[in-house]
Amino acid sequence: MMLEPPAATTMAACSSIPRSFPTRTDPRRRSLSNPRLLRFPAPPFPPLRSLHAASSPPASRRRAHPRASASASAAQPKDYEFTDGNGEVELRLDIGKLGIESSRDVFVDVDDTSILIRAKSDGTLRTLINVKTLFGIIKSSETIWFIDEDQLVVNLKKVEQRAEMA
């Protein structure tokens, strides 16, 4: 009869399997299921949010980003202003420097939540204002625009928000 070697010696011969498993817990060792074992020292670097805040300029030097975008050849942001009235919004855009010859050179495209104004100047179609998301909803069918001396004036009628009844 042939005797089989004990399982522990067979397992010890294999290098990837531990020779024996401890039955008593060493006070310096704990199982991975014990949450107290998983304490790691604080990382030596700040979290990413802090890095981003540290790399951005202080609040006193930050520029507010206008909601309207303008191309490099368009009117500068200081050349327009929005006036918010009770039931309408008026946009005045200084176009005197652009050399616009007539209202046929101006294109105003408005829908309920956005406005796009382009003008043909020196044979080139330029974007003057492109607001993709207005602060509220407007009645695009009631929008009027005209040229007043060196300014393009656009009147936008607001949609009245109805209060929901409880």
Image: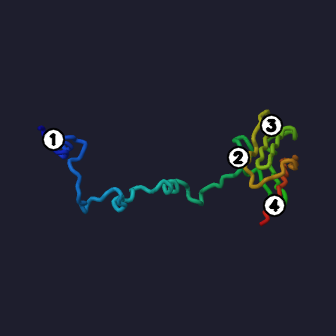
Q: Are marks 1 and 3 in contact (CB under 8 Å)?
A: no
**Circle 3 or circle 4, nearest the eye:** 4
Query: For mark 2, what is the residue?
Result: 69
Distance from Cα at disc 3 to Cα at disc 4: 40 Å
Q: Are marks 4 and 2 in contact (CB under 8 Å)?
A: no
In the picture, residue 24 is in which quadrant?
bottom left
Query: For mark 1, what is the residue?
Result: 4
Three-letter amino acid code at the position of disc 3: Lys
Q: Secondary structure at mark 3?
A: strand
Three-letter amino acid code at the position of disc 1: Glu
Image height check: is 132 above or below 164?
above
Residue under the point 49% across and 57% down: 50
> Which numbered disc, 4 or 2, marks the residue that appears first in the sequence?
2
Distance from Cα at disc 1 to Cα at disc 2: 83 Å
Q: Are marks 1 and 2 in contact (CB under 8 Å)?
A: no
Query: For mark 3, what is the residue?
Result: 120
Query: For mark 4, what is the residue?
Result: 162
> Which numbered disc, 1 or 2, marks the residue that appears first in the sequence?
1
Three-letter amino acid code at the position of disc 2: Ser
Q: Is residue 68 left or right of residue 7?
A: right
> Which numbered disc, 1 or 4, marks the residue that appears first in the sequence?
1
Residue under the point 82% across and 55% down: 159
Q: Nearer the viewer, residue 23 or 79?
A: 23
Q: Secondary structure at mark 2?
A: loop
Three-letter amino acid code at the position of disc 4: Arg
Q: Is residue 33 left or right of residue 139?
A: left
